[in-house]
């Protein structure tokens, strides 16, 4: 408005400088708010023999490695059209892409993993596959965590029992590796618990594609940390191998691993 006056104050030159600065600030703000391309992979997603471009895009939080509004974008290599897919949990740290055959169909499937940033090291994980010409979600970590439920109870004689309700199995952990100081806090000299103690199994914290059978089709190694009296009191890990059975990722096997202790 000031520029429309015949003799503006401050001078016309000064007002033009101010306007240019404001326009530059608006442009920087627009660039800050626009999505960034985090990673790009190429693979044949729809099985037509032509490579497609697969992106993860997101909005950066200023002065932070935290990403918001994460989206999966697939550009069809034949038509050059874009398909956008969102996630239930679309914010987090270090979003990554992996393309590989998880289902045995023609073409690549898509694995997306996002760190939640929580103290338990939990992740969000999603797998997408082209089914009948449409990109569909065939795995998500929330459903996995809801299905794979456990109980963790400390037992007499320096043991902990992990019960897997999903598989109807139990695992016994030897706690003697934790050392005398740790054990003396919760057991009497006869190895009897001073009080009942329950732990828990954390949500999914690792999800790794591994071609165990070397047949070109990836299995998935799912890791969940076992906590004892508190979250930093790690007792071991539940390790579950999942394999696509034509409808869902079913359990191929499950083991529990403990950590090593110092030689006495």
Image: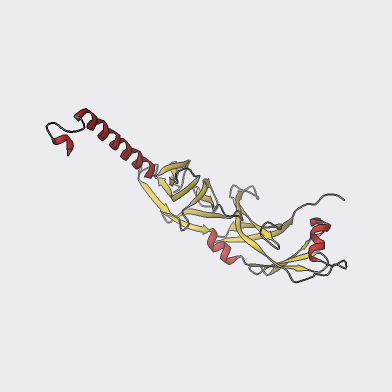
**Which is more toward the observer, 203 or 242?**
203
Extreme-left residue of the structure? 6
**Which is more toward the observer, 226 or 211?**
226
The residue at the point 73 percent across, 68 percent down is 197
Extreme-front residue of the structure? 9
- Above-or-below relation of 8 to 228: above
Q: Is residue 54 visible?
A: yes
Q: Quadrant of residue 52?
A: top left
The residue at the point 42 percent across, 42 percent down is 36
**Which is more toward the observer, 69 or 48?**
69
- Above-or-below relation of 62 to 10: below
Residue 40 screen position, x and y as percent: 47, 41
Q: Is 10 positioned to the left or the right of 223 in the image?
A: left
Q: Is residue 247 visible?
A: no
Q: Is 33 positioned to the left or the right of 161 in the image?
A: left
Q: Quadrant of residue 251?
A: bottom right
How many numbered marks are there? 0
Residue 133 screen position, x and y as percent: 41, 54
Extreme-top residue of the structure? 13
Q: Quadrant of the N terminus?
A: top left
Residue 146 screen position, x and y as percent: 56, 66
Q: Is 243 positioned to the left or the right of 76 in the image?
A: right
């Amino acid at each position: 408005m000031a520029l429309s006056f015949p003799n503006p104050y401050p001078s016309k030159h000064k007002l033009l400088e101010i306007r240019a600065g404001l326009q530059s600030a608006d442009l920087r703000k627009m660039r800050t708010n626009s999505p960034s391309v985090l990673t790009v992979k190429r693979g044949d997603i729809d099985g037509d023999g032509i490579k497609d471009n697969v992106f993860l895009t997101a909005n950066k939080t200023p002065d932070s490695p935290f990403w918001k509004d994460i989206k999966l974008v697939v550009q069809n290599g034949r038509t050059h059209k874009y398909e956008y897919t969102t996630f239930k949990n679309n914010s987090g740290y270090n979003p990554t892409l992996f393309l590989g055959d998880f289902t045995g169909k023609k073409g690549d499937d898509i694995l997306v993993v996002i760190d939640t940033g929580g103290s338990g090291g939990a992740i969000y994980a999603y797998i997408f596959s082209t089914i009948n010409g449409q990109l569909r979600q065939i795995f998500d970590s929330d459903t996995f965590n809801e299905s794979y439920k456990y109980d963790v109870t400390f037992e007499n004689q320096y043991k902990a029992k992990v019960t897997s309700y999903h598989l109807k199995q139990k695992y016994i952990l030897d706690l003697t590796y934790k050392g005398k100081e740790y054990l003396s806090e919760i057991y009497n000299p006869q190895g009897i618990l001073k009080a009942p103690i329950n732990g828990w199994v954390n949500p999914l914290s690792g999800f790794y594609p591994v071609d165990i059978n070397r047949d070109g089709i990836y299995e998935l190694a799912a890791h969940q940390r076992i906590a004892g009296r508190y979250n930093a009191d790690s007792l071991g890990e539940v390790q579950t191998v999942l394999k696509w059975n034509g409808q869902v990722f079913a359990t191929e096997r499950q083991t529990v691993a403990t950590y090593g202790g110092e030689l006495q």
